[in-house]
Image (cartoon, rainbow, N blue to C red):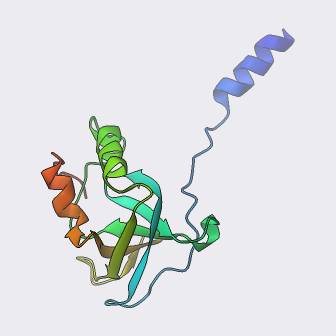
């Protein structure tokens, strides 16, 4: 009976959501430039950059030039993996921009245009077969 109660408790307990580890200060003005090594890829159009090993210094970015399908969609994990293959552990140069709503920060992420070796990350994603379809 004891094991049945423990098992039922584990099955009924709420799942713990895995939050991204990025906790750095976000650029607050359009045009503010920043750069760093890609330390984390959250989905097909979100990542974190930073030069320090400490996640408290990583800046969370929502790419301005590519709208990937949501992570929970049929292709979401493949889209995240595509972005990771292109940019993980590589240095990006980014500039904060205003989104469609006019804000620079949305959902605790800075909207930014990022480049890898001078090429826009959105263009690299499309060239690698990425298809847009997110929000």
Would you say 85 lies left or right of 41 here?
Answer: left
Residue 134's place in the image compared with 71, above or below, is below
At 32% from the left and 75% from the top, the residue drawn is: 112
Q: Is residue 19 left or right of residue 112?
A: right
Residue 107 in the image: state x and y as whole percent: 43, 68
The x, y position of residue 56, in whole percent, is 63, 70
Return the residue nearer the eye: 34 or 18: 34
Above or below, 104 relative to 40:
below
- Quadrant in which the C terminus is drawn: bottom left
Spot the residue most to the right. Answer: 2
Residue at x 58%, y 69% (from the top left corner): 23
Residue found 25% across the figure and 53% down from its top: 68
Q: Is residue 132 left or right of residue 74?
A: left
In the orientation shown, which residue stands out farthest toward the top? 1
Q: Is residue 37 above or below residue 14?
A: below
Residue 28 appears in which quarter of the rendering?
bottom left
State the quadrant of the N terminus. Answer: top right
């Amino acid at each position: 009976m004891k094991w049945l109660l423990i098992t039922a408790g584990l099955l009924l307990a709420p799942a713990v959501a895995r939050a991204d580890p990025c906790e750095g200060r976000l650029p607050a003005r359009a045009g503010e430039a920043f750069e760093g090594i890609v330390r984390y890829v959250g989905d097909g159009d979100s990542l974190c950059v930073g030069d320090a090993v400490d996640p408290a210094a990583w800046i969370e970015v929502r790419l301005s030039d590519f709208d990937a399908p949501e992570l929970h969609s049929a292709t979401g994990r493949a889209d995240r993996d595509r972005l990771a293959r292109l940019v993980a552990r590589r240095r990006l140069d980014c500039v904060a921009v205003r989104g469609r709503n006019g804000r620079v920060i949305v959902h605790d992420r800075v909207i930014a245009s990022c480049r890898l070796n001078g090429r826009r990350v959105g263009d690299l994603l499309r060239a690698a077969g990425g298809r847009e379809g997110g929000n």
